[in-house]
Image: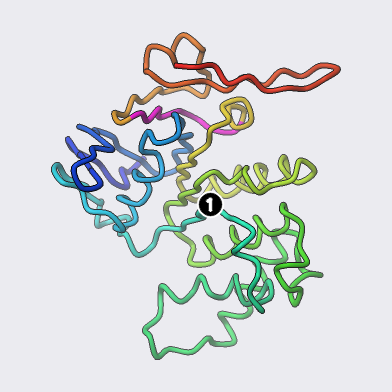
């Protein structure tokens, strides 16, 4: 598979505070990588560097110009309740993902609307096309923002904690959509929940200022401790519960 981008000895900081140090990492076509690590370890910063929102203080980020550039990356940021209190509907949000491909003075076309409606249908939301965001469930809302991220048919999809706003009844459905999308785009997904994503992803990257890449979807507690990262263990039983081991 062709490489999409590569980080070479890359470091980043906020002022004098170092966030990422000496990152060497590459993503290829059809990769499906789970990015895990402790809060404050640099996971979201990693995504923002790929998007061009933050510039590294040293090192390089190199895109394969024959395959991808920073303008054709889909991005699903963390979602909060503040994101749904605007007078817009499902179709408006999905269509807004086309703006990155247009000039400031361009208008939406009939073909843009048709494409948005096709994506909305593929996500099982056809009956909600004109529904305001604040009338949707968490799972429905997450799929709407996923539609916005993929309408430009990106080669790379970045997801920042997508499970945070998904209710349990839609969680498996949402990850199945991602599984299908991975057949035509690479996915880099930040998550704190190893158990929830391990059956879907192909490999792990643990980020805790430095990055350790694990070329398997299976990872042990011993692996995590050796990388300096915590692991979230989900136990299923009469009383399902979660244990977050310290590091």
Q: Where is residue 83, by image quadrant?
A: bottom right
Residue located farthest toward the front when viewing the structure as drawn: 16
- Is 203 covered by the magenta stretch? yes
Q: Residue at x 20, y 39 (%)?
A: 11
Given residues 180 and 140, the one toward you in this image is 140
Q: Residue furthest left?
A: 58
Query: What residue span does the magenta drawing correspond to?
Result: 200-208
Q: In this view, does 141 lie to the left or right of 101?
A: right
Q: Quadrant of residue 110?
A: bottom right
Query: Percent position (x, y) of residue 231?
Result: 52, 20
93 vs 197: above or below = below
| Residue highlighted by disc 1 | 78
Mark 1 Cα within 10 Å, few/some/many (few <14, many 20+)?
some
Query: What number of labels is visible?
Result: 1
Q: In which quarter of the image is the N terminus?
A: top left
Q: Which residue lies furthest to the right in this view?
A: 238
User: In the rendered view, would you say 216 is above or below 15?
Assistant: above
Color theme of the render: rainbow
Asked if the magenta segment contains residue 125, the reply would be: no
The residue located at (78%, 22%) in the rendering is 240
Residue 178: where, in percent of width, then height? Answer: 60, 46
Measured as percent of width and height from the top left, residue 234 is found at 67, 21
Q: Specify the quadrant that holds the C terminus.
A: top left
- Left/right of residue 5 with respect to residue 196 in the rendered view: left
Q: Where is residue 74 in the image (x, y as percent from the top left)?
A: 46, 58
Q: Magenta segment, principal secondary structure?
A: strand
Along the horizontal axis of the image, is 221 left or right of 172?
A: left
Mark 1 residue element: loop
């Amino acid at each position: 598979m062709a490489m999409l981008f590569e980080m070479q000895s890359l470091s980043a900081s906020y002022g004098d505070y170092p966030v990422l140090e000496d990152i060497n990492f590459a993503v290829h076509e059809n990769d499906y990588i789970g990015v895990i690590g402790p809060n404050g370890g640099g996971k979201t910063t990693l995504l923002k560097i790929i998007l061009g929102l933050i510039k590294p203080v040293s090192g390089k980020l190199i895109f394969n110009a024959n395959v991808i550039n920073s303008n054709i990356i889909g991005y699903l940021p963390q979602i909060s309740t503040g994101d749904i209190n605007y007078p817009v509907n499902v179709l408006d949000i999905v269509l807004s993902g086309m703006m990155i491909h247009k000039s400031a003075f361009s208008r939406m076309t009939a073909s843009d609307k048709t494409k948005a409606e096709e994506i909305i249908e593929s996500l099982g939301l056809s009956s909600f096309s004109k529904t305001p965001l604040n009338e949707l469930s968490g799972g429905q809302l997450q799929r709407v923002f996923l539609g916005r991220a993929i309408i430009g048919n990106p080669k790379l999809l970045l997801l920042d904690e997508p499970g945070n706003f998904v209710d349990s009844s839609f969680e498996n459905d949402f990850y199945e959509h991602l599984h299908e999308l991975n057949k035509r785009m690479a996915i880099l997904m930040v998550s704190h929940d190893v158990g929830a994503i391990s059956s879907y992803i192909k490999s792990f990257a643990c980020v805790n200022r430095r990055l350790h890449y694990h070329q398997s979807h299976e990872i042990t507690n011993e692996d995590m401790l050796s990388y300096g990262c915590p692991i979230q263990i989900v136990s299923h039983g009469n009383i399902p519960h979660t244990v977050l081991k310290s590091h």
